[in-house]
Amino acid sequence: MTFAHWLPFAIASAILVAIPGPTVLLVISYALGHGRRYALVTTAGVALGDITAMTASMLGLGVLLAASATLFTALKWVGAAYLIYLGIKLWRAPVVATDESSMAETRAGRIFAHAYAVTALNPKSIIFFVAFVPQFIDPHAAAWAQMVIFEATFVILATLNSLGYALIASAARRAIRSARVQRTINRTGGTLLIGAGIFAAVWKKAAA
């Protein structure tokens, strides 16, 4: 694969990941609610979720989802329900004045799992990869080698994008000292996540 084949994919991917979606919203919400430590944990979950979704699509799961309306609908509802659940949890999250180190490991693990699940359980992403990646593959070169490079490129860009959103949001959080403001942020983020879940639930297969 030549640089001329890779560059258009990298540019298109950079534009794609920069557009805020449920994953970016989750990253921002946790960064605002819990600070930089958990922003990094969330970013790691997003990265692993992207790897899972893209690898699954490359192995043919995307084709299966595109062909099976029942499977697609089931996965869509699971992902939508999970987003709504996370939104409710964030909306109801208590505001704490200081970090509790005794809860750090458990909370970090849960946040990582949430970020991973939201990213990996997105059928639209899986199907998108199946439709998106082949457009940039050079038919005269080894396909699998190209797909590995494309996947690595996309995951790196998506991870850097999520980290950037997270660091900006966590920096904004440090400027906030009012418990009322923090509670408002949590509830706003939770409401947006619930809205994203509802949107995912009504999103039509034909829009993929």
Image (cartoon, rainbow, N blue to C red):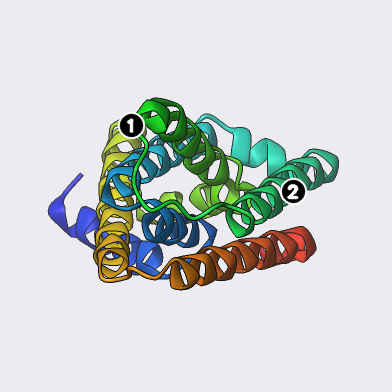
Find residue 71 and report its horizontal and vertical position in percent: 79, 38
| Residue drawn at 69 percent across, 36 percent down | 64
- Given residues 111 and 186, the one toward you in this image is 186
Find residue 153 and report its horizontal and vertical position in percent: 26, 47
Residue at the outermost left position: 3
Pointer 1 residue: 101
Q: Is residue 180 above or below residue 6?
A: below
- Distance of mark 2 from mark 1, alpha carbons? 30 Å
- Answer yes or no: is residue 150 visible: no
- Given residues 204 and 172, the one toward you in this image is 172
Which amino acid, by three-letter code, is at mark 1?
Answer: Ser
- Answer yes or no: is residue 191 visible: yes
Position of residue 65 in the picture relative to residue 17 (left or right): right
- Which sits earlier in the primary sequence, circle 2 or circle 1? 2
Find residue 3 and report its horizontal and vertical position in percent: 14, 53
Position of residue 108 in the picture relative to residue 114 (left or right): left
- Given residues 7 and 155, the one toward you in this image is 155
Quick one: quadrant of the N terminus?
Answer: top left
Q: Is residue 89 above or below residue 192?
A: above
SS at mark 1 in the image: helix
Which amino acid, by three-letter code, is at mark 2?
Answer: Ala
Pointer 2 residue: 81
Residue at the outermost right position: 70
SS at mark 2 in the image: helix
Which mark is nearer the camera, 2 or 1? 1
Position of residue 194 in the picture relative to residue 39 (left or right): right
Q: In which quarter of the view is residue 100 placed?
A: top left
Position of residue 133 in the picture relative to residue 166 (left or right): right
